[in-house]
Image (cartoon, rainbow, N blue to C red):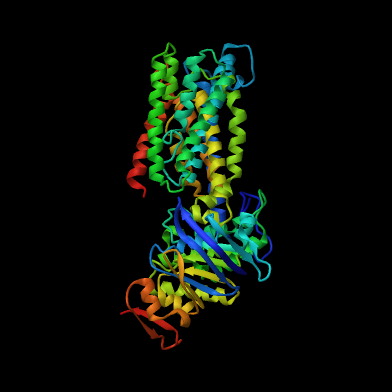
Amino acid sequence: MNIRADGLTLSYRRFEVVHDVSLSIASGEFAAIVGPNASGKSTLLRGLARVMRPDAGRVYLGEPGQEQDIATLGSREVARRLAILPQMQQLDIDLVVEELVWRGRTPHHRFLRPATPDDAAAVERAIHATNLEALRERPLRALSGGERQRAWLALALAQEPRILLLDEPTTFLDLRHQVELMDVLRTLNQGGLTVVAVLHDLGLASRYADHIIGIMDGRIAFEGSPSEVMREDVLERVFGIPMTLVPDPRTGRPVPLPS
Amino acid sequence: MTEGAPASATMTGAGESRPRSWRSRRRQRFVTWTLLACVLLLAVGLLSLILGAITIAPADALGGLIPGESFERTVVWQIRLPRFLGGVLVGAALGVSGALLQVVTRNPLADPTILGVSSAAGLAVAIALVAAPAIGQQSLTVVSIGGGLVGAGVLLALAWQGAVTAIRLTLAGVAIAAFFGAVIVGLLSSSRTFLQLSLGFLAGGLYGSDWRDAAAIAPVVLPAGLLAFALGSRLNALALGEEMAAGLGVLTDRTRVFVLGIVGLLTGAAVAIAGLVSFVGLVSPHVARSFVGDDHRFLVPASALTGAILVTSADLIARLVIRPAEIPMGILTAAVGAPFLLYLVRFRR
């Protein structure tokens, strides 16, 4: 499923954060949104997900050729097409993993109707995709950071979205859990899910994404495939420090290092 | 709406042979707690019919459930039974209000008293009592609910901009509660209505509560409570955080308006007959949560039952400690609630 923004302008209390951004992410892409702190990445993601109402501009969502303006769709309809995983939350809530994942079925529920086998099957697939089978009965409070993040990811997957938006899914995770999570996302992406992730780690972005969007001061600073946009001068301009690019010996993709 | 609405949603098909232990555990704990709470409530109810300024034999107390001519029957039917039922309604209304406020403000310390909704309803009642001392219970209920809705509206206006944190909301609520409370005391003490009546009102109590009281609030409390229960699934989404709930297709602003409206109705109804009963809305959801967990389809009814038990037992004790006189019931809920609040502050989060 495609997602496309056209002249998107977003602000908090009249403080404009994202200015007139247009972008297009095609069905099946793995896109990464990168940029310095406070550049408007998360806000852009919230605008794309319709969690935030734009001041101007539109977001279109749909299969190629039949995109619809997201503002004209019902909120539950949007939630069945697109899921958003906000920044990792410290939520003290007394739930077990599977119970949390079930809440992802909210947009599919009909008022006062019991759960259906479809619901159960979607929850099962989400738990399987995130390797949480062994932890399904575990209280959230008893999980490590990486496990907890996978549980929240499973909740988003239980929505059965065609597009998944993630806001810094790997922040606060150790290296192994970062890679595990990104591998899960890559597998999902290869299964046809369109993935759009805000990432802080340029190395991860370069390694996993096939479409990188750089944001600076609420505008698109660069956009393209990793090999197109990972250039020392571009990165230095956006991130404000000199960078050196080293090719990953295994994939050949450029890995930026602060120099 | 779903994932296993208490009993009906057994999974069929899709190869569901594995035992679903978390679900059965939740359900089992809810059923156990509900049964236990019902037994407790019935026991308190029976004691409420037996004990009071005079003690009535259990057999006569039960006989009083059928209206009759004898003195005992009159006491039970005209005084004690409606007072007990009034207590059940007040407790359930406050318990549910607390549960709703705690989820929409995402603050474990939220409660209609702390956030000033009770004081707003109380102020409306005080104004009505001073302006028209002979006002009927039904009109008073309407006035009180109006006040409760205004209080909820003020709270909403403060929370509306999104950037209001739970802490700021709580501080604002405390300020509203203190301000309205001061106006109430000022009004009542500067008028001739300042009698034992207004003391009972300020501290919260069911003194002299009769069938008219219970009948006045039941048509509000029951449907509002059912609505709150029906919102369970949305509340569950909201409990995951603003952004997550919006991502799940829940219209968070609309839900919040709706929920605060229900809180205004319930709190207004409770204040109309019991005055400013504190801490029931705070304590009940926490007690209920420790039994049934964080699923609002269970938590809302469990909070209602817990609140009902708290209020009716406080009322029972309130009329026994200095028999044949009474102390205001709200003193007892505060005496239990305040230490519990301290416990929460000290040991949770």
Residue B268 x/y as whole percent: 52, 29
x, y percent for residue B334? 39, 31
Location of residue B35 with respect to B86 vertically, above or below: below
**Residue A91: which quarter of the image?**
bottom left
B184 relative to B32 in the view: left or right = left
Locate residue B135 relative to residue B162 in the image: left or right.
right
Residue name at image x 43 percent, y 11 percent: B192
Please name whichever residue, B113 or B188, is drawn nearer the observer in this view of the structure: B188
On the image, which quarter does residue B60 sit in? top right
Q: Is residue A6 left or right of residue B193?
A: right
Residue B313 in sight here = no
Nearest the camera: B183 or B10?
Answer: B183
Q: In this view, does A242 lie above or below A162?
A: below
Q: Nearer the viewer, residue B195 or B210?
A: B195
Residue at point 52%, 23% (across, down): B273
From the viewer's perspective, is residue B129 above or below residue A193? above
Residue at the far left in the pictured view:
A259
Q: Quadrant of residue A53?
A: bottom right
Camera-side residue of A34 and B316: A34
Q: Residue B40 placed where, x, y %?
A: 51, 34
In the image, residue B119 lies at what x, y percent?
A: 44, 29
Q: Decide if residue B283 is in sight here.
A: yes
Report the number of numbered marks: 0
